[in-house]
Amino acid sequence: MFSPGALDICPPNLRGIQVCLAKDVLKRACLNNAILFSPNRHYDAFKEIRKMAAITYKLYAKGGPGNNVLGDCPFTQRANMAFEIKGVHPELIFIDLKNKPDYFLTINPSGTVPVLQAGDTVIADSAAIVDFVDETFPEPSLKPEGWKEAVDVSGNIFNTFSAFAKNKDASQTEELKRVFIEEVKKINDYLSKRKGPLFFEQQWTVADCMLAPRLYHIKAVSEHYLKFDPFSDAGALTTYMEYVFSSKVFKATGYPVEFIYGGWAKYFN
């Protein structure tokens, strides 16, 4: 039968994996009747943990200036936030997207970032990486009940903003701006009905990992290049951004706003 005290037993040679993961794996093993705890058998519960601990998690990311710091990629930050929320820190490998190394193109022929390499597994899509992280490290969960609705509500704002910001046809500017502002209003209305400060109170979710880095870009580009505030009438969304941008999770995975200015400069020069 399950012994709660067994969750506090951890072999001293375990390195590179979080205690929360160890406890979660132990708990799942117990619930599945895979392990019967006894003084001589508790180490068996860590077989799965040792296997996972042996895996090296490498996150290939856009490099910033000098290619020795994290660059301005909202999709990489999305994936990295999922790791940070779980308390797991992958090895970051910076990629110069203007001069992609051959070894990286061998791993991911499309040349896009982020890419997660976990042992023999390679994932080259930020949403899929977040799903992988949430499944591999189940606690805390990034998918509470209702998470899909939050993703659906907030999922189109970056596309509509990019279409508006990058537009060169003056005859389409106002319509593209209107469509973008409608997305802002939709998210603001949704958040205004929530308790906050995140979509699900204090719980970080896949929706926050997706939206927060995109809002960072939208806010920076709007203020610096477009000279307007799309959030002036979006009080709930503004409060959301203030909380997220000041959070440890966001700061630990982010980059200076100047990197965003540089990354978007080509669309305004």
Image (cartoon, rainbow, N blue to C red):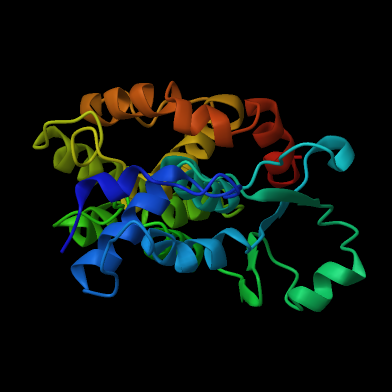
Residue 58 location in percent, x, y? 68, 58
Question: 213 or 30, which is in the foreground?
Answer: 30
Give the left or right position of residue 202, taking residue 255 as reference. Answer: left
Quarter of the image for residue 102 reads bottom right
* Residue 254 to residue 94: above or below: above
x 61%, y 70%: residue: 124
Quarter of the image for residue 132 reads bottom left
Evaluate whether residue 176 shows in this view. no
x 45%, y 47%: residue: 10
* Residue 106 to residue 72: above or below: below
Residue 244 location in percent, x, y? 38, 29
Give the left or right position of residue 71, taking residue 48 as reference. Answer: right
Give the left or right position of residue 165, taking residue 55 as reference. Answer: left
Instruction: Please tell me how many numbered marks the rendered image carries.
Output: 0
Residue 256 location in percent, x, y? 66, 26
Q: Quadrant of the N terminus?
A: bottom left
x 48%, y 68%: residue: 47
Q: Residue furthest front?
A: 40
Residue 218 location in percent, x, y? 49, 38
* Residue 98 to residue 218: above or below: below
Evaluate whether residue 156 shows in this view. yes
Q: Which residue lies furthest to the left in this view?
A: 193
x 84%, y 53%: residue: 96
